[in-house]
Amino acid sequence: DAGITQSPRHKVTETGTPVTLRCHQTENHRYMYWYRQDPGHGLRLIHYSYGVKDTDKGEVSDGYSVSRSKTEDFLLTLESATSSQTSVYFCAIRVGAGDEAFFGQGTRLTVV
Amino acid sequence: DAKTTQPPSMDCAEGRAANLPCNHSTISGNEYVYWYRQIHSQGPQYIIHGLKNNETNEMASLIITEDRKSSTLILPHATLRDTAVYYCIVRVHSGGGADGLTFGKGTHLIIQP
């Protein structure tokens, strides 16, 4: 499983509250990613990181911020959660020189 | 990344070979073919990738046509646990870049007992 864990696995939160999801890896990989998955849209890239303090936006970054202060942790923050951010969030790490990616088990977030 | 076309769904009997097609007629010379799958409620799982030669690993075989405009993922002896959505992705190797993968709708493979 490439040593990648996401926390929490499930969360219910209220509209307008801040939420932080954590992705932790144990193998010192440089590249980390956050995706969301919704019915009818498939997997979409939110943000990614190519090193400590190096991050960039993906396809659906509005309403999200990320931080990577240590190689092993990539945090995704919803500053003020909205119902449209109800989704399943997946973290991934890229391994090797190509595009082999290992994904976490996902976080199911519900914003009520 | 080149566009891919996959059938939305397929059935296969347990124990038989599952052959999943992918069309990528606009693929360019430096683009690889990647396959991932996603079992219900789990994160996507890398299966295999190739450039132009056929590839095989412990999970599957990848057959790429000589003109590289299409490919087939083969699961040699499908089991019920192979029921999943299979994604074919074509892209240039990221190398020093970092952009993520673009997932389409994939093929929902259902293994029948």
Image (cartoon, helix red, strand yellow):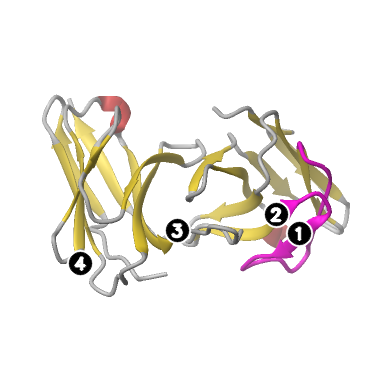
Query: Which is more toward the observer, B30 or B73?
Result: B30
The answer to whether mark 1 and mark 2 are in CB contact below 8 A is: yes
In terms of sequence position, does the residue under pointer 4 or pointer 3 come before the other?
A: 4
Label 4 and label 3: CA atoms lie apart by 18 Å
Q: Secondary structure at mark 2?
A: strand
Residue in the image at 20% along x and 46% along y: B54
| Horizontal relation, residue B18 to residue A19: left or right | left
Label 1 and label 4: CA atoms lie apart by 34 Å
Residue in the image at 36% along x and 64% along y: B31
The amino acid type, in three-letter code, at marker 3 is Phe
Q: Report the magenta residues as a range.
A: A50-72
The amino acid type, in three-letter code, at marker 1 is Thr
- Residue marked by disc 1: A55
Label 1 and label 3: CA atoms lie apart by 21 Å
- Residue marked by disc 3: B103
Residue A50 shows which numbered tag?
Answer: 2
Query: Chain ID for label 3?
Result: B
